[in-house]
Amino acid sequence: MANPNLIKSSYLIDVVKHRWHYLTISIVMLIPCILAMLYLMFTQPNHSPVKLGIDFTGGTILQYGIENSVTPEKISTIRFELEKNGISNPIIQNISNQSSEGGIKNIISIKTSFIGEKNNKQINKITAVLAQNTTAPQLISTTSVGPTLGKELLKNSLAAMLLAFLGIVIYISFRFQADYAIIALAALFHDAVFVVGVFAILGILYGVQVDSLFITAILTVVGFSVHDTIVVFDRIRENNRFLAKKYSSGEIINASVNQTLARSVNTSITTLLTLLALYFFGGSTTKDFVLAMILGIIAGTYSSIFFASVLLAWDKEIKAKKANAQSN
């Protein structure tokens, strides 16, 4: 049961009093993201709001066995040399090989745009760059993903996202009243647009492309965002059940947000510490995935505290004014 003593005259965060400030921050966050997404949708042949990687457009993975170990600095050098030789956006991963059979100590995996079976010129360029930077590179496997298969993967990824959103809509609709559910979905949309929009901006400025791991990150962010919002809404609903006759909806929402504030912030900080460690000390191939998670956790924490609660307070205020007008 809610404790009436928890309703105070002042709080660390007053979401009702400063709601226009918080909504302005959300607008400033989202407008550049939406503009970048629209720009790519109108300028790209596939009309995608982000630049798609070879997972979705097709590509080739080449694996080379080498006789020496390769440092991250050397991988950066190889990537630079490949781009200088016309290999666009190569993704390079150093895979340790436990066996030293045949003198191979490491395996380097290079993912590039689609290379046809008869296009040996591109493969020869890659081999030549590796020969300059490693010891005795041997091409041990070639795997290609055709454009058709890439489109199929994109379609399946979009279907997975739509099913996830549909499941969340059904769950929230049963768990909460319609107004709670709509606002929770608005917060979810807020977070997804922010993450996708930032990657659209990075794609325009730095050519960053998204792959299947990005879809995984978005789905994870969606789950985190909804979970955080539901925690806040549960507290608001519980307090409203017992205190609605004594306090206004704004006071109850302010109290509920501040009661769950420490939990939301502490959960996000511990998650971000892990993600930051992965971003700065992890492999280069997972940096974009981790970056999407970091952006999503920050946006999800912000939206559950400052965006969803503000919209709910606004909604309650409008309904109260209508009820008063009808009674008069």
Image: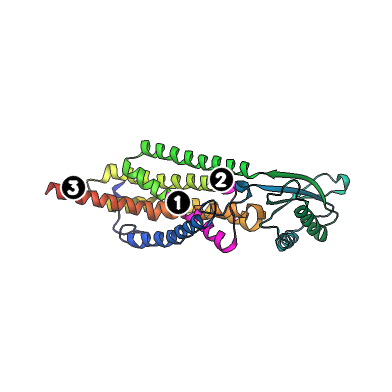
Q: Residue at x 68, y 49 (%)?
A: 114
Q: Residue at x 85, y 46 (%)?
A: 100
Q: Quadrant of the N terminus?
A: top left
Q: Give residue 15's position: percent from left, percent from top.
A: 34, 57
Q: Give the side of residue 149 with respect to residue 166, left or right.
A: right
Q: Give the side of residue 66 with respect to residue 248, left or right.
A: right
Q: How is the image coloured?
A: rainbow
Q: CA distance from mark 3 to mark 2?
A: 44 Å
Amino acid tagged 1: Ser
Residue occupied by mark 1 = 264
Q: Check residue 60 for magenta coloring.
A: no
Q: Give residue 50's position: percent from left, percent from top.
A: 53, 54
Of the two numbered discs 2 and 1 on the same chain, state the one appearing first in sequence.
2
Of the two numbered discs 3 and 1 on the same chain, state the one appearing first in sequence.
1
Circle 1: element type = helix
Mark 2 crowdedness (10 Å alpha carbons): few <14, some 14-19, many ≥20: some
Circle 2: element type = helix
Q: Camera-side residue: 122 or 208?
A: 122
Dominant secondary structure, magenta: helix
Residue occupied by mark 3 = 323
Q: Check residue 194 for magenta coloring.
A: yes
Q: Quadrant of residue 240?
A: top left
* Mark 2 or 1: the one toward you: 2
Range shown magenta: 189-214
Mark 3 crowdedness (10 Å alpha carbons): few <14, some 14-19, many ≥20: few
Q: Residue at x 26, y 45 (%)?
A: 243
Amino acid tagged 3: Ala
Give the number of the disc on residue 216: 2
Amino acid tagged 2: Thr
* Mark 3 or 2: the one toward you: 2
